[in-house]
Structures are given as structure tokens and as C-alpha cells.
Amino acid sequence: MPFSRHSRRLFVAAAAFTAAGIYACAERDTTAPSDQAALARGGQGPDLRAAIAAKDKYAGQLLAKEGVVGTAVGLGSSGQAVIKVYLTRAGAAAVAKSLDGVAVETKVTGELRAILPTAKPGSGGGETDPTKRFTRPVPIGVSAGNLNDLVYLRTVCTTGTLGARLKGANNQYYALSNNHVFAVENRAQPGDPIIQPGQADNGCRSTAADQIGTLANYVPLNFSRTATNVVDAAAAAVTTQTVGSATPVNGYGSPSSSILTAALNMAVEKYGRTTVLTHGTVTGLDASVKIRYGKGNTATFVHQFIITGTNGSAFNGSGDSGALIVTDNSTHNPVGLLFAGSTSTTIANPIGDVLTQLGQRLGTTLSIQ
């Protein structure tokens, strides 16, 4: 039987199970797929099908509870597949111990937010490496933003991270980041100047001299209570003279052009504007989460994955929004786009969905350079 898109995604995620995370969609069947004999390479790892089916079935009910900010499929203390429920605080919501025979575990993450560092006009910018102005072509993983964000936000300016350089089948180059970084949560206009560093790292005094490209397009964020999102992504038209393809020298170097699907226990890393080079582990798949944006807007995202920092350390901080997440090995395969989370938990868009949805908006096929 041919794999459905959903089945292919689950198979690839689980097949990579044994391979060596704050701030700133389509519904799936609630029955487990039956066209896969195994969900892990060599039969290793737990069968995730029952947990994913139960999570999908009850995700809406769980997210409707006050104090619940997300749910995903992960591994329990004994290595079994479980449903994870993320809470704003301990005891914030009553959650069943199991759902359809699948164990449920709760984790306190706090509110999940897409938050950017902000500055008021006249304030100073940061002094750490990724926040400075780089000689063109600028590296990836550094401060960037929309020149007009102060116009759109009126009282503050912001910044985020330039995640990667993309190339379209149309031979146009693009810089990748989040909608809330480059497009200011749907406020921006195509052609807006995209700058490096972002305004908040330049005292809200950036000028056209800081421009590295122009906003090409973005995937709109939908804040309706009945709508779901899959990606928070935007692209700026750039050239190889304005944007490079590698991190600064204290980063991991260049990402591979070959993307992978996130898998449980996958070791990952990222280089971002605020916390620079950090390491983590994928601890949740197929996540449904509620993300708080500016002015109290909340957007629901589905099919996300969850990252926890290594040894209890934070995987990212405010201003790392837009960073590319890659495998923590010699190949640095892209797996996700960082966009939200809390001090203990990072939320990422699957990179395949990012490239597909942005490519549709741009009218071309995209690859990472």
C-alpha cells in the first residue's frame, strides 16, 4: 500500500530514532496507520503508532484546558512511547494518567512564546558576537530584522536570527527567518528592507546602509481560535554578496543541503543571535502547541517538534528566533526552524514544511545552501 504523506513522515522520523530548543495545519486521522510493519530501523525503539493516534485524538481536548500549552509524543522514563502534556505550572490542569491505554506524562514548561528582544529608540545594542554588524556577506545565525519594525510596532524595535541562506530553482537567493522576525507578525510589506544587525541591536537607529536584502514573502500567521499553523517563516531576497552560507567561526560551520526529519533522541545544535552555539535533544514529536505572540495573540501550531537543552542547559534565548536547527554531527543536516518556546523548552517547525510552504509563496522550489 503506498504511504500517505502522514505515514511517510512518521516512518522517516521513527526510522532515524537511533541517529546520533523560546520565544521567538492539516488535521490528521485519529487512527493509527496500518501500512507499516516497523517504525524503527532494525526493529529498535518503541512503536509510536498507538501514542500518535491517541495524541491526535485527544489533542484538541487537552489544549482546551486552562494551563495546558501543548502535547506531543515522546519517550517515558523506561523508554516506552508516551503522550507528553506541557503545563504552565505544576498542577495547572487535571490530566488523565493514560489515554486509550497510552501512558501520559506531564512537564512544566511555562507559557510558550514567540518573543523577540526589544529596545526603545535611543537604547544601546548588544555587544556579543552575533549581535554586531558583520562585513558583507554576513554569516548565518546572526542578528537580523526588518528596518521598518519600529514603524509597525511604534514604540519598540526588535531583532531575531538570520537562519540560513536558501536558493530557489529560479536561481534567486534568499535569507531564511521567522515571519515574526522579518515580517513583524504579518505587518510587513514585500520589498521592506531586511537589515543586519536587527534594529534592537542598533539602538533602533538602523538605516538603509544596514540593508542586506528585501522581504520577498512570508507564510501568514493565523491567530483564529479554529485555525492551525505549521510554520512561522519568511524569506528575504538577497545575493551571495550580502549573505553567506556559514556561521561565524565559533559556530558549526555550514549546514548540509540534505535535510532530515526530526526523530526522538536525535542530537541537534543551533547557532543563534543570543545564545550562540548550543546543543540539545529532540524529546517530542508531532507536537500541538499554543504560542503567545505580541498584543496577546495566540496561534495554534501542529506537527511541530520539541527540543530540550543538553544537561539541563537552555537551548535558546530571546532573539534566537529564526535559527536553523541541524544535526549535532559532522554533516549538520537541517531538521528545523526555531521559533518559540520557554526557558526550558524549544519549539521548532520541521524544515521540510518550511521549505515547502515558503516555496509555494515564492513560486519556486527551495533548498538550503
Image (tube, rainbow, N blue to C red):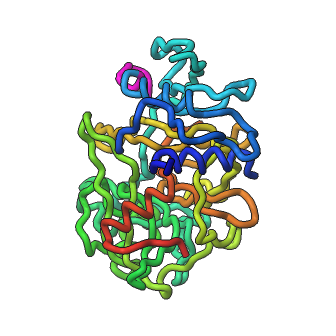
| Left or right of 187, for residue 23 | right
Nearer to me, 332 or 47: 47
* Residue 65 colored in magenta in the image: yes
Relative vertical location of residue 302 with respect to residue 212 in this rendering, above or below: above
In which quadrant of the rendered view does residue 260 lie?
Answer: bottom right
- Residue shown at 49% from the left, 37% from the top: 287
- In the displayed orientation, state which residue is furthest to the bottom: 241
Instruction: Give coordinates of residue 131: x percent, y percent.
Output: 54, 65
* Left or right, 337 with reference to 267: left
Of residues 208 and 302, the one nearer the viewer is 302
Whether residue 122 appears in this view of the structure is no
Q: Residue 102 vs residue 123: left or right?
A: right
Note whether 103 is above or below 203 in the view shown.
above
Seen at 38% across and 83% down, the residue is: 170
Q: Nearer the viewer, residue 57 or 72?
A: 57
Against 73, residue 142 (above or below) is below
Where residue 361 appears, x then y in whole percent? Answer: 30, 66
Task: Please name the residue shown 48% across and 54% down the image.
Answer: 321
Q: Identify which residue, 132 or 173, lies in the foreground.
A: 173
Q: Position of residue 132 (x, y in %)?
A: 54, 70
Q: Is residue 186 visible?
A: yes
Instruction: Look at 69% across and 73% down and name the residue there.
Output: 249
Quarter holding the C terminus?
A: bottom right
Q: Is residue 38 magenta?
A: no
Query: So how many labels did they put on this image?
Result: 0
Q: Quadrant of residue 301?
A: top left
Residue furthest front as drawn? 1
Part of the protein shown in magenta: 62-69
x, y percentage for residue 60?
37, 27
